[in-house]
Image (cartoon, helix red, strand yellow):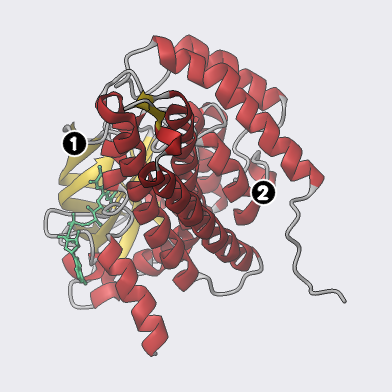
Amino acid sequence: MDAGIGFELGPELKALREQVGKIIREEIIPIERRIDPDAAEIPEEDYRRIALKTQAAGMWCMGSPKQYGGGGLGAFELCVLSEEMSQHRMGLYNPGAGVFGRTPPPVIWAGTEEQIHKYAVGTLRNAWHTFFAITEPSGGSDPAGAIQCRAVRKGDTYVLNGTKIFISHAHEAEWGVVFARTDPGAGRGGITCFIIEKGTPGFTPRPFRTIRTSAVPCEVAFEDCAVPIERRLGPEGGGLSLCLDLLTRLRFPYSACNIGVGVAALRMAIEHAKHRSTFGELLARRQAVQWMLADSEVELRAARWLTWEGAWKADRKEDARMEASIAKLYSSEVLGRVIDRAVQIHGGYGVSKEFPLERWYREARVRRIGEGPSEVHRMVIARNLLR
Ligand SMILES: Cc1cc2nc3c(=O)[nH]c(=O)nc-3n(C[C@H](O)[C@H](O)[C@H](O)COP(=O)(O)OP(=O)(O)OC[C@H]3O[C@@H](n4cnc5c(N)ncnc54)[C@H](O)[C@@H]3O)c2cc1C
């Protein structure tokens, strides 16, 4: 009987996963061991050297469309690879230290051919940082209600005024996208997306520090910032629906990174438990420790299946919005629990900067807030169940 479900990854994907893992283990982790544990990036010369290798091996921007220079992989394949890519110190917010290329905000693929060529293809070629600005001081959970940043059309130009907050990479990005209100009376249909280039007069990003080491966020001020009409992305009023659809697909590789860091933390906890003795017995022989390891394994496997199932549905063009919320919610909460147990098993070493655990512990906390807080994803899931 053909049950119609395959549990085996194809040989090509398995080989690619092995290659990605090898680069992380043999290239990225040794560099991270010799640099500042709080570094956001690896040194430029190392970055260039390894990026040339991944480009030559066809492992560059694997999730971006093929016709624009990407690898054309689907969400499922990207999940399998992202889990490997994130298994290093800076891997949660800088998977693979960027040596597999950098992805532009996915809304750009809804742009005109000129916009795609100038901004998306430029990013694929040059590994530019980009930004995605939706959150405002008035709130990020409910952008449809909270966005106050205004864009007023004057001839062939829009003039933007307002403030965005927590915008990752805005100070170092070549370009990014911002969502502003063009019609205050039209609710979610009154929000429009614009492309902002670095150095545009009236656009001022100010970086500030948070619990997270990588991908520093900024407060971004727009003060009479003139944006030509060619930099409007999509139709006027179409900003929010554009962004919510395209962001759904991103939630699967994002969740896979949560799983990858969890897997790496659990591997460290197992190794430590097998070598550390207290009161004349290895930690690995204590049931209290065994249960922490067992619970972590169970939860990581469950998170992986939820993520893979959702990605598989998204690749089949099925509606996977609820699955995206389930994967994001569960994987980020599991990540927090797994790292917490790994820190506990390591004792004092768990919070030492000698090991990546303390950085993962800090950065994992953001995963339950960024890309929509857990409560908002629960709300989306409940809404679907009760519809
Ligand atoms: C380090 C970092 C980087 C970020 N990067 C970006 C970025 O690049 N671009 C960007 O646009 N944004 C970014 N964000 C913003 C992030 O998406 C928002 O912080 C998030 O959406 C929550 O918005 P808020 O902080 O305004 O919290 P609020 O919307 O004020 O919500 C506060 C809390 O209220 C609770 N809550 C909210 N709604 C509900 C509800 N319906 N039911 C029950 N409880 C609820 C949740 O616990 C939530 O955490 C970043 C945030 C951080 C911390």
Alpha-carbon span between mark 1 and mark 2: 33 Å
The quarter of the picture showing ligand 1? bottom left
* Label 1 beta carbon within 8 A of ligand 1: yes
Q: Which of the two discs, 1 and 2, labels the residue nearer the N terminus?
A: 2
Q: Residues within 10 Å of mark 2 (few under 14, many from 20)?
A: some
Q: Are marks 1 and 2 in contact (CB under 8 Å)?
A: no
Residue 291, image x, y percentages: 41, 49
Up-down: is 321 above or below 214? Answer: below
Kindly indicate the quadrant of the structure image that contains residue 345: top left
Q: Which residue is mark 1?
A: 210
Instruction: Say whether residue 98 is visible.
Output: yes
Q: Callout 2, which amino acid?
A: Leu
| Residue furthest bottom as drawn | 387
Residue 54, image x, y percentages: 64, 25
- Residue at point 49%, 41% (across, down): 263
Q: Nearer the viewer, residue 256 or 123?
A: 256
